[in-house]
Image (tube, grey):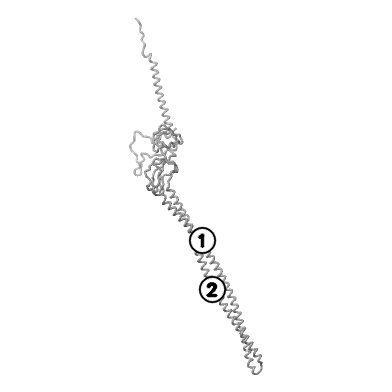
Amino acid sequence: MEQVTTVEPHATSSPKAGLGRLIGIGVVVAAVAMLAIVALQVDLHPRTDDASVRANFIEIAPEVSGRLTELPVKDNAYVKQGGTLFIIDPRPYEYALQQALSDQEALEQQIVDAKRHIAAQSSAAEAARAGLHSSETGVQTAGSQIDVSAAAVTRAQAAVAAAEAQLKLATNNLHRIEPLLKKQYVTVEQIDQANTTVRVAQGNYDEAQAGLSQAQAAQQQANFRKVEAASLAVEQQARLGQAIHTIDTVDTLESQRPAKAAKVDAARLDLERTKVVAPFDAYVTNLNLSVGAYARPGIPLFTLIDTRTWYVIANYRESKLKNIHLHDHVDLYLMGHPDRRFNGTVESIGYGVFPEDGAVAQGLPNIDRTLNWVHLSTRFPVRIRVQDPDPELFRIGATAVTVVR
């Protein structure tokens, strides 16, 4: 009877089963290791798709009013710095500038005329001053002439008195010797000589009297001249005072120069403001008007998006902020172009968001009495500056993915 050898099944399959278990364990360990590595990488290099593209933008509003005569830009068009955005009808502002320049020139002409007038008034004052000096000299001269005339009158009066005394003496002598002629005590020749002496004395007296009258007349004339010179001096003094009083100054006119210059500068500035140019390279957006529209100061016409600098605002959970620092490098991806990677730098990290439970009722905090089982972590905005933006791909509000390295 043959002996049949039986082989236990587990004896031959045991090595394969052990190998399978080892492979399975290895796969699990590798998966756990990879998961740990991924978790560590995600923690060390925070990533979020809660991010959006931002850029600075300004609203373009005119600073003067008027009709739009030119509007060369189009909505969503790209404009270079210094490119014309629109032109407002400049004619009213050209007229205002011409008027301001005319007023300024008129003021300058008034100042020139005033200076000439002042020069003439000053000459008149100098002439009046010289006339006053001459009149005062005339008064002094007339006073001296009065003194001389008074002395001449005194001398003439003395001469008259002397001539009168000689005449009386000669007359008395004649009257004494005339009766003696009949008695022949005197000769006819003596009588004739006495008569001659009387006539000579009479002539001397008449001459002295005439000299006195002439001296008195000269004295009166000197007095009149003094009075006339004094009156002239008073008149010249009045003229001098009037000339000095009428001398104007240009201070009032010259004080108007800053105001006139300011009006010219304001008019020139308003004229320059009728042409508005792009302050930087930008995209035009929200343009909904045409040539002929009336522009008003301070009312925006459209918006310019500054393409020089682009940002991404990424909202990171507060648990991830510990691994985000200023100037960290960031990989950026746009949702519309995930195949392109852009480089960025952390520029700032937000320090506050409005809390959901921050309501206030009657001056006291209003705290919700319920508590959710799952409490979501707060997200804080991280501002990332794009280092190599593509203006053709970047748009404000576009979704982005950021990875902090």
User: Which corner quadrant holds the C terminus?
Assistant: top left
User: Which corner quadrant holds the N terminus?
Assistant: top left
Mark 2 burial class by Cα count in 10 Å: few <14, some 14-19, many 20+: some
Estimate the x, y position of residue 204 in percent, counting from the top left. Answer: 62, 84
* Farthest residue, direction top: 1
Q: Nearer the viewer, residue 73 or 395?
A: 73
Q: Which residue in the structure is indicated by mark 2?
A: 228
Q: Which quadrant would residue 170 be assigned to in this image?
A: bottom right
Q: Which residue in the structure is indicated by mark 1?
A: 116
* Farthest residue, direction bottom: 183
Residue at disc 1, secondary structure: helix
Mark closer to the chain start, 2 or 1: 1
Estimate the x, y position of residue 124 in percent, counting from the top left. Answer: 52, 65
Q: Amino acid at mark 2?
A: Glu
Q: Amino acid at mark 1?
A: Arg
Estimate the x, y position of residue 252 in percent, counting from the top left. Answer: 48, 59
Identify which residue is drawn at 60% across, 78% down.
152
